[in-house]
Amino acid sequence: MLNFEYYCPTRIVFGKGSIARLPELIDKSQKVLIVYGGGSIKKNGVYDQVKQALSGYELLEFGGIEPNPKYETCMKAVDLIKKEKVDFLLAVGGGSTLDGTKFIAAAAKYEGFDPYDILTKGAEVKDAMPLGDVITLPATGSEMNYNAVISRLSTNEKLAFASEKVYPRFSIIDPSVTMSLPERQTVNGIVDTFVHTMELYCTYDVDTPLQDEWALGLLKTLILEAPKVLENPEDYNLRANIFWCATCGLNYWISLGAVQDWATHGIGHELTAFYGIDHGQSLAVVLPRLLKNQKAVKQEKLAKLGREVFHIKDKNDSEAADLAIEAIERFFNSIGMKTRLSDYGINPQEAAEKIKARFAERDTKLGERAAIDAQVSYDIVKAC
Amino acid sequence: MLNFEYYCPTRIVFGKGSIARLPELIDKSQKVLIVYGGGSIKKNGVYDQVKQALSGYELLEFGGIEPNPKYETCMKAVDLIKKEKVDFLLAVGGGSTLDGTKFIAAAAKYEGFDPYDILTKGAEVKDAMPLGDVITLPATGSEMNYNAVISRLSTNEKLAFASEKVYPRFSIIDPSVTMSLPERQTVNGIVDTFVHTMELYCTYDVDTPLQDEWALGLLKTLILEAPKVLENPEDYNLRANIFWCATCGLNYWISLGAVQDWATHGIGHELTAFYGIDHGQSLAVVLPRLLKNQKAVKQEKLAKLGREVFHIKDKNDSEAADLAIEAIERFFNSIGMKTRLSDYGINPQEAAEKIKARFAERDTKLGERAAIDAQVSYDIVKAC
């Protein structure tokens, strides 16, 4: 096991009716900015629940955070915060809204010249505004980590940052609010969670049997619950299990002391930046091809996954790994997720060339051994 | 899944050489009281590592916290803290030292008449001194929770309290320091971890498939690693895996939203209070008999455990549950843990009567359905 440090001070308030507990979590003296996205929270009743819970608070609102939240939009919120002297940020929505709010929290307190440096130059986040969230989409795990991914319109870039300062003070997770999600979003979230788990598990072995058990247990649970939740979208327990899987897929509990990959996300982010396909779609397209390309170095963990999750028997490691990759793609397809670029009207050759050019320009090297460079990425995307 | 709240702001610093990171974790302005136990830390080099890391700090020491820390001893530390105006408590040792330090932290700030009320009357812990720890024994999980168990000599009682105020600010876990542990302590810790997992898993099903996978994954890992670590006590990775299992056995990650039991601990604590046997020994004696006694209501989870952990095949739930209980006891025996009261020179009949009398007097009702009263406890202990 590798040395590790783990710290997460976010209070998770999970369950039916938990939005009503907001007044326990935000001091009444605080001037609160509610940050949200495209307005789905006004249709599904979450906005009303939040407003009711916070009646008597001094509230402001900032809507319009995009899926793949834009730097430009976030900076408008920062202006509002400075003008109105906001004390506390409450993100209400999915991972994009929360990621945007994390960046807003850091940018509002940034003392350097340009907060964009946090994303491009790794400028230190020395302070951030306090934030909490009502998370409404099981997918990104942003509710229990300190990461955020932000896009910039003007440069077609999708960039990440991480800082302990932007941990949510609390995350309210009421799985009931996901019952009305469009199926496409439910499926995207399941695939996102599946791929987070793969990024954290499917690397090389550093002798972490407990973490491996937990990662594989998470995959098994997703495979068990996913078809059921698509069949019964209003079943509370299924929604609760899917949400808790999503949170645990990226709170790092399954990988402390283990090795992480993140190449599928690295390539997927580019597909989203260039072609606007959903994050979950981009991952579903890349993962099988990346695993195939990297089979030689991932074979041991892939074979273990194949045996424990997909019950593959009587095969050697190489065969079990191949079958595991096929089974993963079949699982994605079985829940209605398409796994080929052509399914989204994208020419693989063209996409491969674009990504190769960008990675070459930036000297990008992805993956647990930094082995996935521009040329390898080209090979992977061309096969998508 | 049940509603739940989860919050743990403890920073875990895990790995080789992590004691040297103490200066990053305690501000140099703090007057630090090092709290320890019987002095084993002076033999295994941990004391020297701590002193070296904190050279230049204003340090005081308080040794002599007992296994099953005594209220009377803790209160002596409180006197010292008040006299010397200590700012920060650093527990260095096992779970008992840390539990004692948690109580000291709360008692030193207690404003009521008698801090013993925290233990007996559930008096609210409104404030506590900041504390951190260098944990040297994989067993109690105290390094990542807010619980503590304290004993009182004068009344032969063993009592628990819990408060978010006594969460360690940090816990340093260097598995290297456990290589020199006596085998008995290693085994006690493995059994303690196993039983924590059982208390959190083996109740009734509220549809928590991920949590169940993780609990069973933890048991599998213990069963995999335990014989190896006894064979190779100086293997770092084995020590690391056992320690991380112990921490995860009681940080509640495996049971959020699930139902908890704690009857084995409730009865075991009495055996320790009356007869002075080790905590791990008391649990190993009680668990198999308690599971047998409660088989009717635990059968479903026991059968699942039997199939997934002990590979029991082609049996109905009742048979699989019986075989699982036998397999657990066999596992304890296989690592050198004796599982009968007579092995410790205790008369089961006498023990059963003592515990029955005490539980009747206190109207104790243990277990996930509060079904284990004085008479049921008598039946269980008599069968031990």
Image (cartoon, coloured by chain):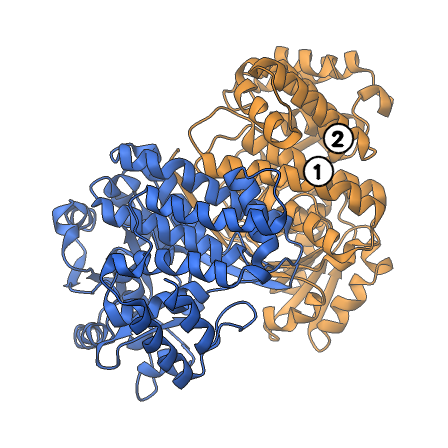
Chain colours: A orange, B blue
User: Please, what is the three-letter code of the amino acid marked with disc 2?
Assistant: Phe
Q: Position of residue A322 (x, y in %)?
A: 65, 16
Horizontal side, residue B78 vs residue B208: left or right: left
Q: Quadrant of the C terminus of chain A?
A: top right
In terms of depth relative to the viewer, which is nearer, B113 or B344?
A: B344
For the residue carrying disc 1, how many other residues have a C-alpha within 10 Å: few (<14), some (14-19), or many (20+)?
some
Place residue B34 in its image quadrant: bottom left
Residue located at (43% from left, 56% from top): B288
Percent of width and height locating residue A53 = 72, 72
Quadrant housing residue A4: top left
Q: Secondary structure at mark 1?
A: helix
Q: Earlier in the sequence, mark 2 or mark 1?
A: 1
Task: In the rendered structure, find residue A331 and report the number of the disc placed on it.
Answer: 2
The image quarter in which residue A158 lies: top right
Q: Chain of mark 2?
A: A
A188 relative to B274 in the view: left or right: right
Does residue A289 lie above or below A258 as drawn?
Answer: above
Q: Residues within 10 Å of mark 2 (few under 14, many from 20)?
A: some
B300 and B153: which is toward the camera: B300
Left or right, residue A88 beside residue A368 = right
Question: At label 1, which amino acid type do we have?
Answer: Ile
Q: Is residue A296 visible?
A: yes
Whole-percent x, y for residue B88 in the image = 27, 64
Protein chain holding label 1: A
Q: Secondary structure at mark 2?
A: helix
Residue at the image point whose x is 59% and y is 72% from the top: A27
Task: Kindly identify which numbered label has been placed on residue A223.
Answer: 1
Q: Which of the labelled discs sits on residue A371, or is there none? A: none
Residue A161's place in the image compared with B170, above or below, is: above
Image marks 2 and 1: residues in contact by CB distance under 8 Å: yes
Label total for image? 2
Can you say whether A51 is above or below A352 in the image? below
